[in-house]
Image (tube, rainbow, N blue to C red):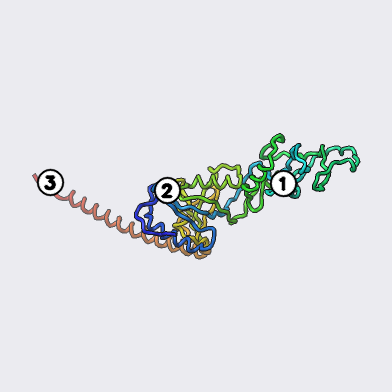
Amino acid sequence: MDYSHQTSLVPCGQDKYISKKELLLHLKTYNLYYEGQNLQLRHREEEDEFIVEGLLNISWGLRRPIRLQMQDDNERIRPPPSSSSWHSGCNLGAQGTILKPLTMSNIQISEVDAPPERDQATSPTDSRGLKPVQEDTPQLMRTRSDVGVRRRGNVRTPSDQRRIRRHRFSINGHFYNHKTSVFTPAYGSVTNVRINSTMTTPQVLKLLLNKFKIENSAEEFALYVVHTSGEKQKLKNTDYPLIARILQGPCEQVSKVFLMEKDQVEEVTYDVAQYIKFEMPVLKSFIQKLQEEEDREVKKLIRKYTVLRLMIRQRLEEIAETPATI
């Protein structure tokens, strides 16, 4: 990776810039820290614009539950009528192999009267020796969810199912179902998104929510840089999270990027963060010393202005006793 000296500026926020040379030095340190890992970042120039891209680790710091979209990847696929190599409840893999039926542990099965018994000898079987193909197989009925109602008529094709499985992600193993569609990710658990240095904070938030099919609006959340000292810095809408991460340094034992609710977290400045981890007796002693210092300053000001008032009164008396001259 070429870290040649550059002189142009790279935006890192509203009215904030960093020289390309300095950013490349930070980037070199960042990549050395993650040498041999997929968290290394790449950079390129496109139309005279310097762009860094790669994975950004984001920790979950939510206090309220989130809602996943009503899209269950584990739904049962109805075989097409013309297919003789399918049977109810089976799915085809990427190479045409038959996979085991997908489990539906969180979906209730409606009670359907059992069909009349048929002679098994007359049941058709396919050329691969699979189970008999049943013409009127009872379908699994979904229960209503607090998120919405699923339309039964929209059946995905096998290729759609494979595409969804490739692009659908889970949060700690959670996909949508009617019991775990609303839950809170474990505090501090880490995920990542692939972004670049031109993406602002709202764009990164929308990308993260879309990755996990989260229904909540991106307006409810914010990204915070949280230090081990207790300092919490909210990234503005005009900030670039990947640039902010590079400038903070690669070590997540020093600082992490957290996804948090806007109305649940307050920013903590560096000066305040220095006192957060002290025990209460120590903090009380600080307060007592500050109060004593304040009292001394108040007394000093009282003496100063008392003397000044006396001097003014004395001067006024002298002026009054002096006879007027014509």
Quarter occupied by the C terminus? top left
Residue 290, quarter of the rendered image: bottom left
Which element carries disc 3, helix, strand or loop? loop
Q: Secondary structure at mark 2?
A: strand
Q: First in sequence, mark 3 or 1: give its number.
A: 1
Q: In the rendered structure, are the residues bearing label 3 and label 1 in contact, judged by CB atoms less than 8 Å apart?
A: no
Q: Is residue 274 above or below residue 78?
A: below
Residue in the foreground of this view, choosing between 10 and 302: 10
Of the numbered discs 1 and 2, the one sitting upstream in the chain is 2
Nearer to us in this view, 54 or 157: 157
Q: Given the image, on which type of amino acid does mark 1 rest?
A: Leu
Q: CA distance from mark 2 to mark 3?
A: 86 Å
Q: What residue sits right under mark 3 in the picture?
A: 324
Q: Going 38% across and 54% down the picture, which residue do you hit?
A: 18
Position above or below: 4 against 203: below
**Could you tell me which residue is drawn at 65 percent across and 47 percent down?**
165
Which residue sits at x=43%, y=63%? 289
Which residue lies under the disc numbered 2?
46
- The alpha-carbon separation of the residues under discs 3 and 1 comes to 116 Å
Relative to 22, residue 237 above or below? above
Name the residue carrying label 1: 92
Tell me which amino acid carries mark 2. Answer: Glu
Q: Secondary structure at mark 1?
A: strand
CA separation, marks 1 and 2? 42 Å
Q: x, y (%) of residue 141?
A: 76, 39
Q: Is residue 130 visible?
A: yes
Relative vertical location of residue 219 with respect to residue 35 in this rendering, above or below: above
Residue 155 in the image: x percent, y percent?
A: 70, 37
* Horizontal relation, residue 298 to residue 57: left or right: left
Quick check: 230 left or right of 177? left
